Every structure is written in C-alpha cells, then in structure tokens.
C-alpha cells in the first residue's frame, strides 16, 4: 500500500463523521419510529446504493446461491441484532454515550481474534490495551448522571449490539474469498428479509405519523450512514488497507460527542472525557501491538 495522502486522511475523517452521525440521527428517529422499523429501513435503504454499485461493477450478488445460509446468518448477527439493539438503547441514553460504547468494537475484536484466529494472539501490549480500553467503558458506567438504574439496561444492550458487529465480522471470515461488495449487499438483502415481517407484526409502521425530522434521519441512516459509509469503507480499504481504515475507531467517539452536543445539546461530563481518552488509548495500544 502506498503512503496515505492528505486526501486519504480527509476521507477517513469523513467516514468517521458519517458513522458517528448515525447515533444522534438514531436518537431523532426514535421520536417517531420503533427500533425494528428503524433497523429495517436502514438495511433496506442501504441496499439501494449497494445494488447500484454491484450492477455498475458487474459484481454477481450471491444472496440466494448455495451460500445463502452464511449471508442470512451474518445479516442477522451483523446487522439485524446490532441495528435493533442500538436503536432500542439510544432511546434511553444520550447518543454520545452510544458512540463511546460502540467504540469498544476494536477491543472486543481483539479478544475474539485471540480465540478464533491463528495470527492475532494476545501479547503484553495488546492485553494492556484491552484492559485500559474496557476500563474506560466501566468508568463510564459509574457516571450516575448519565447511566443510572433507569437506563442501565439500555446501555448494556448497546454494548451487546457492538458485540454483534464483531461476531458478524468473525463469521464473515467463513466467506472471505468473496468480494466485499457482494457480501455486504447480500447480508443487507437478508437483513431486510428478516426484519420486514418483524416490522409488520410488532410495529405496524403504516399506523405511524412520523415528523419530518425523524423521517429525514431514518432516510439519512439508510442511504448515508449505512449505504454510502460502506461504499466509502470499500474505497479506503482497497486504496490504503485494513490497518489504515481501522484508525476510524479513534475518531468516531470524538465526533459522536461533538455531534451530540451540537445537534441535541447533550451533556458532556468529565467522566465522558476520561472514558473516551481511556478507550482511545486502549484501542491504540491494542492496534499498535500488531503493527
């Protein structure tokens, strides 16, 4: 891979901004939509630009081929579960907290990588990184102002949603020989298929009367924070590699705090700042040990 340019770093920051913006938009969307409906609209709308990309690049979509069960399983674990749990949890916690909790994914990946891969075993620095990073998450839970007995479960559900992303990533290794665009489009298709009947049965979206802000937010979540973000991720991965792209993890919680404050006037406590510093330091140490 060639040395990243200023444009490459700007694109990386833009990707982090898009992903971080998802959290305050989820918060706005929950004012009118249920969590299942939000999850469905995200994957359904995200499928549109992804399908267009595959058609343009003449990439075969294998959602209904012999490997359909892998696409369905990954779609369920990597999209259905996280999108639902995050949408459910964000209704009761600040969006900036969700951004910090979701930033734990590289730390969880490090743990699972030790047990499920041959080349990502723990060493001293990586272990310290995981301990430091998760200490930031634990410290965040000690802030009774923002996480208390009324929304403790919601925060835990967001963490479980983050774990779903990681487990889905591990499962994707089973079909790692396939093109990223094909895999992502196929799992979005299966996630849509899984979520549609659940949306109809449990939330009956035709009875909703969403306000314009929630409607704009849910459309943004699907087309931009999910669809466009994945396309941009593909571009960065292809040009600069996984290690460079993974640096987005450092920026998401920072942008999440800023956007939550700007758009929702969310509270920023000293514990939030300390937690973010610990999480970012932990991610840095965990990743540094593999350089």
Image (spheres, grey):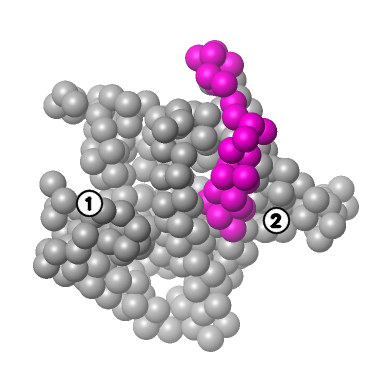
Residue 89 visible in image: yes
Where 155 falls versus 117 (above or below)? below
* Residue to which mark 1 is pinned: 119
Please tell me whether the stretch drawn in magenta is mainly helix, strand or loop: helix
* Residue nearer the viewer, 192 or 248: 192
Q: Which mark is residue 36?
A: 2
Q: Secondary structure at mark 1?
A: loop
> Does residue 219 appear in this view?
no
Instruction: Between residue 85 and residue 180, name the one nearer to us.
Output: 180
Q: CA distance from mark 2 to mark 1?
A: 37 Å
Q: Nearer the viewer, residue 120 or 268?
A: 120
Question: Residue 272 at what x, y percent from top left?
Answer: 33, 69
Quarter location, residue 97? bottom left
Task: Write down the region rendered in magenta.
Answer: 54-81
Q: Secondary structure at mark 2?
A: helix
Residue 279 on the magenta span: no
């Amino acid at each position: 891979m060639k040395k990243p340019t200023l444009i490459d770093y700007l694109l990386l920051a833009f990707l982090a901004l898009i992903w971080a913006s998802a959290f305050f938009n989820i918060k706005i969307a929950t004012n009118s939509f249920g969590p299942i409906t939000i999850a469905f609209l995200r994957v359904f709308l995200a499928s549109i630009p992804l399908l267009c990309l595959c058609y343009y690049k003449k990439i075969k979509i294998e959602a209904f081929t012999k490997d359909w069960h892998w696409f369905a399983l990954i779609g369920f674990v990597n999209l259905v579960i996280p999108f639902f749990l995050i949408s459910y949890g964000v209704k009761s916690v600040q969006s900036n907290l969700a951004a910090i909790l979701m930033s734990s994914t590289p730390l969880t990946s490090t743990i699972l990588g030790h047990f499920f891969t041959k080349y990502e075993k723990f060493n001293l620095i990586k272990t310290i990184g995981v301990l430091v990073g998760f200490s930031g998450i634990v410290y965040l839970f000690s802030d009774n102002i923002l996480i208390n007995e009324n929304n403790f479960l919601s925060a835990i559900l967001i963490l479980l949603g983050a774990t779903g992303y990681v487990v889905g990533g591990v499962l994707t290794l089973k079909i790692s020989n396939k093109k990223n665009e094909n895999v992502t489009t196929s799992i979005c298709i299966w996630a849509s298929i899984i979520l549609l009947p659940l949306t109809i049965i449990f939330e009956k979206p035709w009875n909703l009367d969403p306000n314009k802000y929630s409607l704009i937010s849910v459309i943004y979540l699907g087309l931009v924070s999910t669809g466009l973000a994945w396309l941009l991720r593909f571009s960065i991965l292809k040009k600069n590699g996984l290690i460079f792209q993974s640096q987005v993890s450092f920026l998401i919680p920072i942008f999440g705090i800023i956007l939550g404050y700007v758009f929702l006037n969310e509270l920023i406590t000293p514990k939030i700042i300390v937690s973010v510093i610990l999480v970012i330091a932990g991610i840095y140490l965990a990743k540094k040990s593999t350089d």
